Image (cartoon, helix red, strand yellow):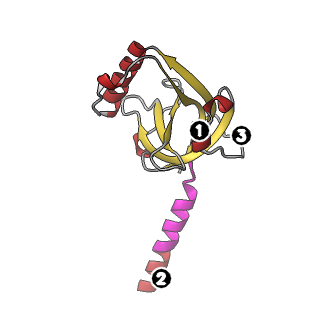
Amino acid sequence: MKKQSLFLLILFFISATSCFGAMKLGAPLTLQEVTKVSEINKHPEQYKGKRVLIEGLVVNVCAARGCWMDIASDVPFEQIKVKVVDGEIVFPLEAKGQMAKVEGIVQAIHLTEGQARSMAQHQAKESGEQVDLSTIKGPTTFYRIRGLGAEIN
């Protein structure tokens, strides 16, 4: 009897986990080929304006609105930010620590020194971290992905 109960319990967990596939957010993913985050970070101008599919570990999520998440690169200590239109897609806080595939457009964001400081303060507030504004000197450009769709496992 114990063996049958154990077997039924295992069968239940296997069927339950197979029923819950990936969490799908936004538009369905259409690209098949994954672009490495490290390649986008290494050659951002080559990807600017292009639609890409990336894959990686979710290392951070906007706690305020779920409007962005950071995806780890295939190179240690590298990442890229995925930003969506507020409310269009909401990344759940539970995504942190999960694997994700994200499709979107690579964007170049050009900021003055004042805008860069303001953005750093805003992001620090959203993530509950501290920021040293004295490290921001002069205008800056960074690259991110405007997210169109995502699958989180």
Residue that mark 3 sits on: 30
Instruction: Name which residue type carries label 1.
Output: Lys
User: Pointers 1 and 2 in contact (CB under 8 A)?
Assistant: no
* Pointer 3 or 1: first along the chain: 3
What is the spatial separation of the Cα atoms under label 3 and label 1, in whole angstroms? 24 Å
When asked about the image quadrant of residue 37, the answer is top right
Position of residue 25 in the picture relative to residue 114 (left or right): right
Q: Position of residue 22 (x, y in %)?
A: 56, 50
Numbered circle sitting on residue 42: 1
Q: Amino acid at mark 3?
A: Thr
- Say left or right for 124 vs 139: left
Q: Is residue 129 above or below residue 111?
A: below
- Magenta stretch: give its range: 9-23
Q: Mark 1 or 2, which is nearer the eye?
A: 1
Q: Nearer the viewer, residue 18 or 6?
A: 18
Check the image and report above or below for 26 versus 111: below
